[in-house]
Image: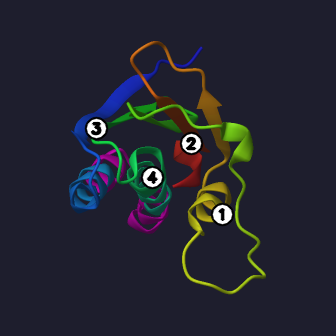
Amino acid sequence: MATTERRLSLRVPARAKELQGIRQQLEHTLVSGGIPLEQARQWVVAVNEACMNIVQHAYGDRHRGDIVLEVDTDSQKWLFRLKDFAPPIDTKSLKPRDLDVVRPGGLGLSLIEKIMDEIHYLNPPDGIGNILEMTKYWSEQQE
């Protein structure tokens, strides 16, 4: 059984202006963990899109709160866990937009699904609104 290591744990206000700091810290964590820069930047895009969805859709204009990002890794994968404290969302209603329809916005879920290997919405414990886990399989042989 692989040993899991916590590589990053952040809690920031759920505001668009805070996402730059998340992106920078995450990229540094990934690169220092042996992920090539080009690959790391793709993973950062997926996490950023998920964070922006929290800001825009989970909290929206009605609520203020935080985003928690936890990044764990073992010898086979990287796990990105995002938690928010907004009202729970109906995960069954989340669908990527049809990419054949040309219009701005709405590509976040499609990008996340394209970049990540697994995406799971977990049942949150009391006090947590939503939990999203994204997994990217990666081993040292891929470097």
Disc 3 marks a residue whose amino acid type is: Gly
Q: How far is mark 3 from mark 1, CA to CA?
A: 25 Å
The residue wearing badge 4 is: 47
Q: In which quarter of the image is residue 38?
A: bottom left
Q: In which quarter of the image is residue 67?
A: top left
Kind of element beneath mark 2: loop
Q: How far is mark 4 from mark 1, CA to CA?
A: 12 Å
Kind of element beneath mark 1: helix
Answer whether labels 2 and 1 touch (C-beta < 8 Å). Answer: no
Disc 4 marks a residue whose amino acid type is: Val
The residue wearing badge 2 is: 139
Q: At which x and y percent is residue 1?
A: 60, 14
The residue wearing badge 3 is: 65
Tell which circle, 3 or 4, labels the residue nearer the N-terminal end.
Answer: 4
Tell which circle, 2 or 1, labels the residue nearer the N-terminal end.
Answer: 1
Mark number displayed over residue 110: 1
For residue 103, side relative to residue 42 (left or right) = right
